[in-house]
Structure formats: C-alpha cells, structure tokens
Amino acid sequence: MLLIDASEVRELLPMKEAIEADKQAFLLHSTGETEVPVRPGFTLAGGSALFMPAYVKGDVNRVGIKIVSVFPGNAAKGIPVVPAQVLLLDSDTGEVCAMMNGSEVTRIRTGAISGAATDILARKEASVGALFGTGGQAVSQLEAMLCARPIKEVRVYDALNDRIAPFVQNNAALAEKYGARLVAAKSSDAAVDGAHVVTTVTTSKAPVFDGARIASGAHVNGVGSFLPDSRELDETLLNRARVFVDNREAVLAEAGDFLIPAKTGAYKIEDIAGELGDVLAGKLDGRTGDDQITVMKTVGYAVLDVVAAYRIYENARKRGIGKEIDL
C-alpha cells in the first residue's frame, strides 16, 4: 500500500490536472458510469464521522472511499478539526493500494470544481473575478479561477473584514504567477459590480451578495453552503441565470440555495438546467449567449474524490513518490 501525505498530494495533482480530473468525474457520473450510495454517518460524543464511497467505472475502474470527521474540539488540541483520508482499491485484487491525505484531496478537487465550471460556462474573455470567503478552501478556489480564465483582477471580500487584508497579502504571489492582482473589496457590492466570474466559499446562512447586481454575462460558482438551512446565493440571481449543478440528487438533498426559496415559491426546482456533466456529454447546452448569466452550484460527492485519488496514485507510481508499506 502506498502512503501519500498532504505535500505529496499537492505535488501530484496540480490545479490544471485537477480541473481535468473533475471534468472526467462529472462526465462519468452523468453518463451512468458511477455508483454512489448515500453516505452513512455517525454522531459521536465529540463530533461526527462520515463515510463517502464510490465506484467509478470507465477508464478509471476504481472503488474508493473518503473517511472524514468533524471534531470541533480538535482545534484546542492543535490538530485538524476536519481530518480525512482517502482509500483507493486495486481493481484486480481488491486490496487497498493507496491511502492519502483526504483533507488535501478535498481542498484541491473542490477548487477544481469551480475551475471546471468556469472553464465550461464563463465567457472566454472574462478578466475580473470576485472571491467571497477567505477560509481554508479559499486559496484553491482562487487558483482554480486563475487557471480557468485570463483573470487580471480578483476582488476579495469576507464578512469578517479583518481577514481580507492578510489573505490578499499572503496570496499576492500566487495571483502574480498567473498575471493577476488581488484587491481588498470594501463591500459585497464593490466585489461583484462588473465582475465576470464570482466564487463564493463561505459558511454563511444568508446570501452573501445581491443577485440583482451581478452583471449580464457573468458566471457564478456557489461552493460554500451544503446544508438545507444555509445559502450563499439568493433567488434573484437564480431566477436571472441558467443554473447547473454537480450532482442533482445531492444538491436537492443538501443545498439550501435551492431548498429555501423553493419552500416559499420564490424559485422553481425544475428551472435547474441540469448537471455540468450533461454539458460535457453533449446532452445539454451550457452558456447560450454572451449576455446570459450562468450559475454552478456544488455540494461535492465521492466520485470526485475517487477520480482525483486515481490520478494522484497513477502519478505517484510513475514518479516514485510516496511511502510503500506492507500490512
């Protein structure tokens, strides 16, 4: 079994390849080449544990599982609050062939979701971005945006204003590598006004910007909210946009962005155009006009983890990276 740590995961799955891995995962899922059971979970005294398995067929042909826990008390112990590991099985023997840092896999593949959606749906000439949220997922979301389009400026906003300046300073070099600069936005309006690509990655319970201010032709990635009582996007935006999701079943079970306005009749679930994988499969049109607003809502699912883990494992074998152990 090959052990792959967080730094090795980053080395083995750069963002551009992660975006292609996510596209492959979306396509395989939308063409019926995956099996994804409902994830079981357990509530414990100090937190919770979730088990996310998937079988990905096609060229990947792998079974894998992500084991992820949420233990808030870990912060006081100086260890991760959301530890995770991904296990990948050998398709010939059924043995576990690799175990890798699942937190890093999640961070990269989640950023790549927005990168894939931006690459597929945003206007080619998009050059101004807006990023809402400066937490643990924000850096990968920023890099994915910069990978997908020739962005020159990214406005950064966080409801906790004291977090904006440090994020801008700490990630200026990353932006410069892609020919972009980061700007601290003074308000949510200042962040979205005139932006061509907007990504939200927050834990907000309420919409983080006014959907009426999104410019015609813009693309929006909704990433942060994944609970029925939380949302980052308002119904104004949804009703103005052509809306796509990563996994329709998962989104309609978890995403308050849709569930909350649907309860009041402010948004109709049937107005969701479809899954991003349907666009990749040629079964559905993506953007249909330069002035059209597009939205991609993701909650994530295990197929993305398995495809990413497969790419990481294959690259590790080719490059001799990782630690081999015999159990």
Image (cartoon, helix red, strand yellow):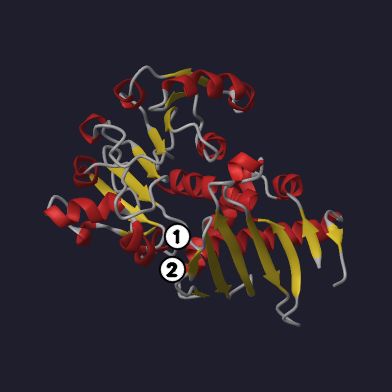
The residue mark sitting in front, 2 or 1, is: 2
The amino acid type found where label 1 is placed reads: Leu
Camera-side residue of 36 and 286:
36
Instruction: In the rendered view, tell whether residue 200 sits above or below residue 9.
Output: above
Is residue 47 rendered to the left or right of residue 192? Answer: right
Q: Are marks 2 and 1 in contact (CB under 8 Å)?
A: yes
Q: Dot 1 lies on which element?
A: helix
Horizontally, is 284 left or right of 236 in the view? right
Which residue is the site of mark 2? 30
Q: Residues within 10 Å of mark 1 (few under 14, many from 20)?
A: some
Question: Residue extending furthest bottom?
Answer: 93
Q: Give how far across and how far down residue 325 sits, in percent.
A: 87, 65
Outermost residue on the front side: it is 45
Image quadrant where one finds the N terminus: bottom right
Percent of width and height locating residue 68: 57, 59
Query: Badge 2 local density, few (<14 within 10 Å), some, or many (20+)?
Result: many
**Quadrant assignment, res 285:** bottom left
Q: Which residue is mark 1?
A: 280
The residues bearing labels 2 and 1 have C-alpha atoms spaced at a distance of 9 Å
In the image, what residue occupies the spot 37% across and 17% down? Answer: 186
**Splitting the image into 4 quarters, where does residue 247 fall?**
bottom left
Q: Secondary structure at mark 2?
A: helix
Query: Mark 2 or mark 1, which has the lower sequence index?
Result: 2
Residue sitting nearer the eye, 122 or 166: 166
Q: Residue at x 81, y 63 (%)?
A: 2
Q: Who's the residue at 49% across and 67% down the image? A: 41
